[in-house]
Image (cartoon, helix red, strand yellow):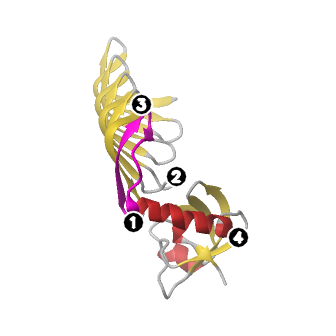
Amino acid sequence: MQVSYQGGCKDGYAEGHGVARGVSGAYYNGTFKGGSKEGLGRKVYANGDEYNGSWVFDAREGPGTYIFGEASSWRGDRSEGLWVADRRHGKGVYIFAPDNIRMETNFFGGVPIDPAPPAMVQRQRAMKVLLPVIGVPGTQVCSITTQGSTSTRIARGVVTNVLEDRLQVNITTPETLRVSVSKMNPRWDNITEWMPCK
């Protein structure tokens, strides 16, 4: 739901460059045609995800980059390439955070259709080993790689949710949160960022 609009107008509809803001903090900054997102623009969604690229009649269409925001279970991941009818389609790249593993692939209807590269295969193997051990809500976990932790400052937390290869962890060490760039708690991380606590 749109709360405010600043920009060009024609016959009562947004036209040309403008900024539209929504109730939940979402906004779009870009070009409009006949009241619809059309041309180049940046949309920031309520959960912090953002899309920068081409739009046709309010749908992502053409070249663009989608970045998953802090509140997303895929925080920091990026998807770059072509979009058709609001979905990834054709040649593109998916970049996995935090280690920036790149998966160059072809997409069809939003789904990658090429085999995974070796680095992704290793990540999938690690996930299969870790998931039964720490992929259960209530499990106590530790990390030396999540934001705010180091090999000498171990982060501790409790798993609160699991989604595919991601864990949502409620951080229980105040020092981790104090020095972390992201103050979000609980936070989503790749499952390989965490290990069982002893």
* SS for dot 2: loop
Give percent across and percent down for residue 68.
44, 50
Give percent across and percent down for residue 169.
61, 65
- The answer to which quarter of the image holds residue 185 is bottom right
Q: Is residue 187 left or right of residue 147?
A: right
Q: To which residue does mark 4 refer? A: 139
Q: To which residue does mark 1 refer? A: 99
Q: Sequence order check: which comes first, mark 2 or mark 4?
A: 2
Q: To which residue does mark 3 refer? A: 86
Disc 2 + disc 4, Cβ < 8 Å: no
Residues 134 and 76: in front is 134
In the image, what residue occupies the spot 47% across and 76% down?
A: 179
Give percent across and percent down for residue 148.
48, 75
Give percent across and percent down for residue 170.
63, 67
In the image, what residue occupies the spot 40% across and 44% down?
A: 50
Q: Sequence order check: which comes first, mark 1 or mark 4?
A: 1
Three-letter amino acid code at the position of disc 2: Ser
Q: Is residue 100 above or below residue 17?
A: below
Three-letter amino acid code at the position of disc 1: Asp
Disc 2 + disc 1, Cβ < 8 Å: no
Q: Sequence order check: which comes first, mark 1 or mark 3?
A: 3
In the image, what residue occupies the spot 42% across and 33% down?
A: 87
Q: Which residues are magenta?
A: 99-118
Question: From where the camera sits, is residue 144 visible?
Answer: yes
